[in-house]
Amino acid sequence: MSVVKPKLLSHGTLMSKDLAATRRFYEEFLGLEVVRHARPAMMIRLRSGMYVVCVCIGEKVPNQHVLTHWGLNVDTREEVDQAYAEALRLKDQYGMQKIQKVRERHGAYGFYFQDLDNNWWEIQYEPRAIDDFFKRGDLFQMDLHAVETDESHE
């Protein structure tokens, strides 16, 4: 029994240097729905009750690590390849920084890239249903200490 009795996981937070440039990237490249709900912030979502608040803090946006990324799933491996080609083509237009190569990782096919605000994104084709992970339960005991490495996400 948990202390908090949540009805849904509602939101998370991203940081932005410039809301207008960030909004353009989110809508035009990532295909997200955006609404400006506050003077220093906007909400983003994609076909769900969960949303992300994007808060403008200017040039103080810290660098992020690839392991703290946001994921977007697509329907096919070909869509991953197409998104990768478009990311390379439109990199300068949207201020994308690093774009890693497409690879098979953790059972999915995709790539990581860093946006204009230092946030990392993963575009992936995940053939497994996410609910199946939770139905299956833990595969490893919690007393197993393992650390993800940069090399696995280079």
Image (cartoon, rainbow, N blue to C red):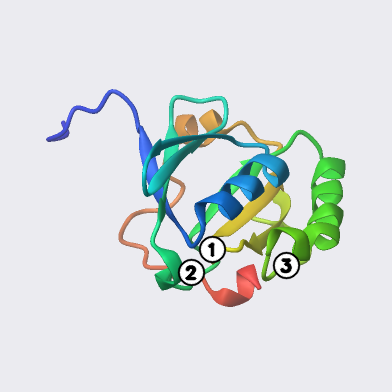
Task: Name the residue that disc number 1 marks.
Answer: 117
Between residue 28 and residue 147, name the one nearer to us.
Answer: 28
Return the x and y of residue 55 as percentages of the image width and height.
Answer: 40, 52
Q: Nearer the viewer, residue 117 or 56?
A: 56
| Residue 150, image quadrant | bottom right
- Say which amino acid is labelled 2: Gln
Residue under label 3:
100
Q: Quadrant of the N terminus?
A: top left
Q: Residue at x 36, y 53 (%)?
A: 141
Residue 124 is situated, as x and y percent measured from the top left of the image, at: 70, 47
The residue that label 2 is drawn on is 64
Quadrant for the C terminus in the image = bottom right
Q: Is residue 107 visible?
A: no
Q: Using the image as rendered, state which of residue 90 and residue 100 is in the foreground.
A: 90
Q: Residues within 10 Å of mark 2 (few under 14, many from 20)?
A: few
Sequence-wise, the earlier of marks 2 and 3 is 2
* Residue drawn at (62%, 76%) of the image: 151
Q: Secondary structure at mark 3?
A: loop
| Residue kind at label 1, given as amino acid type | Asp
For the residue pair 153 and 100, the one nearer the viewer reads as 100
Q: Characterize the local packing of mark 1: few (<14), some (14-19) or many (20 or more) Cα atoms within 10 angstroms.
A: many
Q: Amino acid at mark 3?
A: Gln
Number of the front mark, 3 or 1: 1
